[in-house]
Image: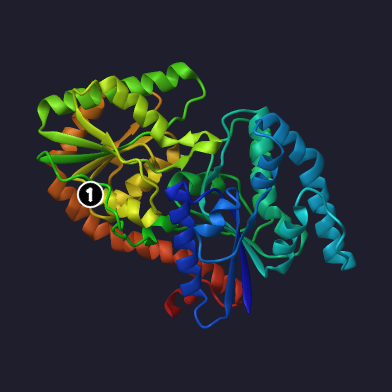
């Protein structure tokens, strides 16, 4: 029996996060084939995620913090004063004294999941970054502690397909470096993160792999929310609320409004807003930005929002029904690309460019912070004119990228089972 605890999962209501966790489970199950395997997920969206994954789901430090207050400052204080010290004490008592001590605030079941595991795998994603010093450091500590607690219990710890950075403060860089020095190895899903970790001269291997979402397989929704096609060109769009400064968010949304109006003037097009994230109780709901933009179009564009709760596989299928996609959410871009749909990506972090580079499409990326409607329109026009070539590029590059996604699980299995990790790739 091999028991794996997957930590640092956010929420399946973020279909990108759900796709990552689902892809991880597929890759790990295939890599550990022939082994009696048991997986458990520690999720920030507990208990809701218990209904969304086919394996046991336990709370995470984030979900325990959310039980205390909706205010980030109080959550951070609760983590520093209660969850961090008591979880460390509990872990050390279990490891060295073989003693299970009483723990507050729901920590007991969570610590039991860590203690029960044979290895801890931090979920793939882009959570090891900061945009602020004080608050950023606390949240960074939560993310790091979520997998480093496995080390306190003597478990091997692996980081699955990560994007790392940017980090707002040198102290945060030192914190991340100190943690990564103590894991078995780190997997990076794009080259900028790989270069960053290489500059840190870590004493552990850093492997370049691909995002686990490339392993997702589409599924048509049982109740298809797409209306019958009404125009010659069906364009998918994903938007999000990202900027803390209201004026930056307003400028981004204004650029999207202007782009959509100009695009509709040139093309017989319908626009479908595809929300990737609908975590409304955490203030992370793409439908809010989509509704603001729709409200400003005043009927000048044939546009609608698909307001439906979908699985990642269903959203992937819907992205595949588009003729092209203009995506701010990185995983909506991955969903479309895996379906052979050309994409213009709006990058809110460097990870977006890195993913597009893997597929030879770095020329179809614009930065979110200074998005210009005219530049976006020009790039989408080029995308449409080059769509046949782009589809050929995807057909040739996607098999390689998918192999890199499978490789992520094989590397972990190869290391944990004690045989050469690269040779283990021949086992699958």
x and y, in percent, of residue 30 in the image: 46, 74
Which quadrant of the figure has residue 112? bottom right
Query: In the drawing, does residue 6 fall left or right of residue 236?
Result: right
Which residue is at the front of the view, 280 or 198?
A: 280
Q: Relative to 386, is 374 above or below?
A: above
Circle 1 sits in a helix, a strand or a loop, which is it? loop
What residue is rendered at 21% in x and 53% in y?
393
Q: Nearer the viewer, residue 53 or 319?
A: 53
* Neighbourhood count class around disc 1 (C-alpha, 10 Å): few under 14, some 14–19, many 20 upward: many
What percent of the width, then of the height, locates residue 137?
Answer: 67, 35
Residue at the spot x=85%, y=63% of the render?
100
Looking at the image, residue 179 sits to the left or right of residue 415; the answer is right
Q: Report which residue position mark 1 lands on.
A: 341
Instruction: Identify the image quadrant of the N terminus.
Output: bottom right
Relative depth, front residue between 138 and 205: 138
Q: Residue at x 34, y 55 (%)?
A: 314
Instruction: Indicate the position of residue 220 as horizontal and vertical percent values.
Output: 28, 58
Observer able to see residue 206: no
- Of residue 119 and residue 288, the one placed in the foreground of this image is 288
Q: Is residue 280 left or right of residue 223?
A: right
């Amino acid at each position: 029996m091999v028991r794996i605890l997957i930590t640092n999962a956010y929420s399946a209501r973020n279909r990108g996060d759900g796709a990552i966790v689902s892809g991880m489970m597929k890759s790990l199950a295939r890599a550990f084939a022939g082994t009696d395997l048991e997986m458990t997920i520690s999720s920030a969206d507990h208990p809701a995620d218990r209904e969304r994954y086919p394996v046991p789901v336990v709370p995470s430090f984030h979900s325990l913090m959310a039980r205390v207050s909706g205010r980030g400052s109080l959550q951070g204080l609760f983590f520093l004063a209660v969850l961090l010290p008591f979880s460390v004490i509990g872990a050390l008592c279990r490891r060295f004294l073989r003693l299970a001590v009483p723990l507050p605030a729901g920590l007991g079941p969570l610590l039991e999941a860590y203690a029960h595991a044979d290895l801890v795998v931090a979920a793939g994603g882009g959570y090891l970054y900061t945009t602020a010093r004080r608050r950023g450091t606390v949240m960074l500590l939560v993310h790091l502690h979520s997998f480093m607690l496995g080390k306190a219990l003597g478990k091997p710890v692996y980081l699955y397909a990560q994007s790392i950075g940017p980090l707002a403060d040198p102290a945060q860089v030192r914190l991340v470096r100190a943690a990564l020095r103590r894991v078995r190895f780190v997997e990076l899903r794009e080259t900028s993160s790989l270069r960053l970790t290489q500059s840190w001269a870590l004493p552990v291997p850093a492997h370049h792999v691909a995002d686990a979402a490339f392993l997702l397989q589409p599924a048509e929704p049982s109740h298809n929310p797409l209306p019958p096609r009404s125009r010659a060109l069906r364009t998918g769009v994903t938007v999000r609320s990202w900027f803390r400064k209201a004026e930056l968010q307003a400028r981004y949304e204004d650029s999207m409004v202007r782009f959509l109006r100009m695009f509709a003037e040139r093309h017989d097009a319908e626009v479908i807003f595809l929300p990737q994230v609908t975590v409304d109780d955490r203030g992370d709901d793409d439908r809010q930005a989509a509704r603001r933009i729709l409200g400003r179009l005043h009927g000048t564009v044939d546009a609608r929002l698909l307001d439906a709760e979908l699985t990642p596989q269903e959203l992937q299928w819907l992205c595949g029904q588009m003729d092209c996609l203009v995506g701010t959410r990185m995983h909506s871009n991955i969903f479309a690309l895996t379906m052979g749909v050309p994409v213009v990506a709006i990058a809110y972090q460097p990870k977006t460019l890195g993913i597009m580079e893997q597929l030879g499409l770095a020329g179809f990326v614009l930065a979110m912070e200074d998005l210009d409607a005219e530049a976006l329109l020009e790039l989408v026009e080029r995308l449409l004119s080059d769509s046949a070539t782009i589809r050929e590029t995807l057909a040739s590059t996607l098999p390689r990228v998918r192999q890199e996604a499978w490789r992520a699980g094989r590397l972990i299995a190869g290391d944990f089972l004690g045989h050469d990790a690269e040779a283990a790739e021949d086992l699958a």
